[in-house]
Image (cartoon, rainbow, N blue to C red):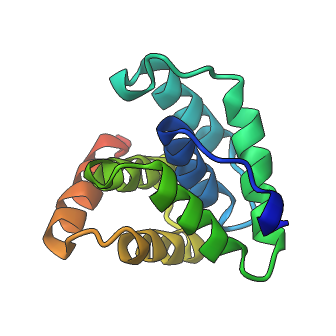
Amino acid sequence: MTDTLPSLSPQDALVAVMVAVSVSDEAIRTSELIAIERMVNHMPIFASYDIDRIRVVAQTVYALFEEEEGLEALFGLVREALPEKYFETAYALACDVAAADGILHQPELRMLEEIRSELAIDRLHAVAIEWGARVRHMKL
């Protein structure tokens, strides 16, 4: 599988990270899918992105999660496609997806930890990003 992986655009890499968080607990929630679609539709970083690519990227992520070394391959693709200056953006988007349903499940927390590690997100920056996601997704 990993020999035939498509290359990703920088925006594809961001989508892949968001999808990875969504599927990390093996339960893709509607709120998470809506969050991904909303971000792709409204954030400037996705201004020129073809929204139909979400399905292709999601299928790639699903296939990688079936492989033994799939997570490692996914992060290799992400690091290859995404300039380092956007690693914190990827982490922020991942946090927003994880917080979208109002509950952070253990597999999502582990995936966020993996993303922090793989993308070498500074711990202080990660805390600020996580806090921002938490307060954006609070309910009354």
Location of residue 63 with respect to 115 vertically, above or below: above
Q: Residue at x 54, y 54 (%)?
A: 17
Q: Residue at x 72, y 80 (%)?
A: 69
Q: In this orientation, which residue lies closer to the viewer: 97 or 120? A: 120
Location of residue 3 with respect to 93 vertically, above or below: below
Q: In screen coordinates, is 40 left or right of 72?
A: left
Q: How many marks?
A: 0
Please, which residue is most extreme toward the left here?
A: 124
* Residue 50, image x, y percentages: 62, 20
Q: In screen coordinates, is 1 left or right of 75?
A: right
* Residue 112, image x, y percentages: 45, 69
Q: In screen coordinates, is 83 left or right of 21?
A: left
Q: In this orientation, which residue lies closer to the viewer: 19 or 56? A: 56
Q: In screen coordinates, is 81 left or right of 3?
A: left
Please, which residue is most extreme toward the front here?
A: 3
Q: In this orientation, which residue lies closer to the viewer: 99 or 23? A: 23
Location of residue 30 with respect to 77 vertically, above or below: above
- Indicate the quadrant containing the C terminus: top left, top right, bottom left or bottom right: top left
* Residue 11, image x, y percentages: 50, 36
Picture quarter containing residue 8? Answer: top right
Q: Residue at x 35, y 49 (%)?
A: 83
- Indicate the quadrant containing the N terminus: top left, top right, bottom left or bottom right: bottom right
Q: Residue at x 48, y 17 (%)?
A: 48
Q: In this orientation, which residue lies closer to the viewer: 138 or 44? A: 44
